[in-house]
Image: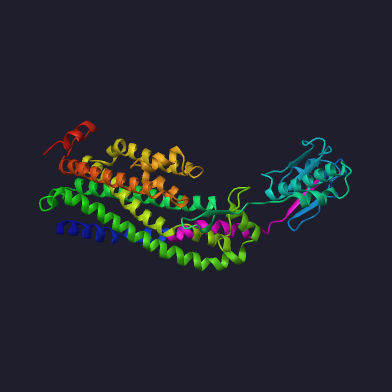
Amino acid sequence: MNKIFIVIEREFMTRVRKKSFILLTILMPILFVGVITVPVLLSTMDNDEKFNVALIDHTGKYAPLLKDTGKIHFMPEKKFAEELRSEDSPYTAVIVISKDLSQDSLGATIYSRKEVPVEITRYFNSVVRDNIRNERMASYGIPDIDRIIAESDVRYEVRTVKWTDDGGEKMSDFKIAGLVGMLFTLLIYMFVLSYGSMVMQGVMEEKTNRIMEIMVSSVKPFQMMMGKIIGVALVGLFQFLIWGVLIAIGMVALSGVLSSDIDPSQAAAMAGGVQGVTIPDAQTPEFLQIIQGMNLLQISIMFVLYFIGGYLLYASFFAAIGASINEQADSSQFMMPIVILMIFALYAGMFSIENPDGPLALWCSYFPLTSPIVMMVRLPFSVPVWQLILSLVLLYATAILVIWLSAKIYRVGILMYGKKPSFKEMARWIRFK
């Protein structure tokens, strides 16, 4: 056991001292915060560019409606002249209206030497749309129809409450529960795939450099494999801890800037994400009550248990692959089935949000190779305890079995050179005594 700790310490210290680890640990939170904040800040910045637009309205109906804005200046023209096409033209675009647009939607065209700026098309469409709607409402002859329609445009979402085991009530929200589940699902998926691959890469490098031959003379192959798996896991946890602290500091530092620069309508649109879908703002009492209504302690404990079980399971696969092959190019045939299985688990989790107790979610949360990812989606929706116990038992039993099988492959593969192994040969290694 002492030798395993020595391997763990060596693996941990070697990796955290690398320049790539330090740079990635520092740059990733900056990139994460930047991806969130930069597009938002750019969307709030005003463009000082002005647009002169020539307006040729043969109907005489729409020219009075198109008023100058802060960025768009409409200049009426009687006819379409050739000088409007030239590079020396003072106009950014030319609007030609030839027919009544309420009767013929193709009766207007915007011409430009380049792509028509979106501000021009958006404003023109808005004005024409309002005009057509007002004309059609007026055609019904109903007094104050515009006011009636405005008052009848009501958005409503029913409040949802779930009962607790002790007979109490807690606020709930299906969308927020799904978002929480997907967050934990993505964390497990990213961690297992990234750091599992790191285990395989480390084994391959030491095998290629013939360092492994020296190390196995004093350390058993099983101790070497477990030391690498646990050492890389600690590196990942350490890196995740630093990322969490730095991201939290960055988001707090930028919260004041964002709150002052973002328009409330923009914030609502970003929170909803999809038209027609609204999510309570993160600062509202409703949002906080919904989050508190979830069993966050259980979710956190299950996240740790499923993360450990899933990582041990897949890292054992990666370690066995790394010990079996001699070159990076040989890893694709062994990696592909594992990667496809993980992608399937991720998609199964995503589609399980709509039906967390359906057949897909249920069976994938039992199957050990998909349960660490899929079960995290179901947890915010209150999974029965017996299902959690069954899923964890199957996961850890399978992880122990895979570790035992991988250790058998590992002990033979790390000393095999020059020959590209096959699945049949790896199965034969398992039977060696």
Residue 111 coordinates in the image, percent (x, y):
73, 42
Residue in view at x 31 percent, y 38 percent: 332
Residue 210 coordinates in the image, percent (x, y):
16, 47
**In the figure, residue 23 lies in which quadrant?**
bottom left
**Colouring scheme applied when the structure was drawn:** rainbow
Q: Is residue 37 part of the magenta span, yes or no?
A: yes
Residue 258 coordinates in the image, percent (x, y):
57, 64
Residue 58 coordinates in the image, percent (x, y):
86, 40
In the image, farthest residue toward the front? 167
Instruction: Answer above or below: position of 148 versus 424.
Output: below
Residue in view at x 44 percent, y 37 percent: 359
Q: Is residue 314 visible?
A: no
**In the figure, residue 362 lies in which quadrant?**
top left
In the image, farthest residue toward the top? 424
Q: Foreground: 126 or 234?
A: 234
Instruction: Indicate left or right for 408 with 17 as reference.
Output: left
Instruction: Indicate left or right for 280 with 358 as reference.
Output: right
Q: Foreground: 233 or 50?
A: 233
Q: Is residue 292 visible?
A: yes
Quarter of the image where the N terminus is located: bottom left
Quarter of the image where the C terminus is located: top left
**In the figure, residue 407 lies in which quadrant?**
top left
Residue in view at x 20 percent, y 34 percent: 427
Q: Is residue 338 part of the magenta span, yes or no?
A: no
Number of numbered discs = 0
Stretch of the chain drawn in magenta: 29-55
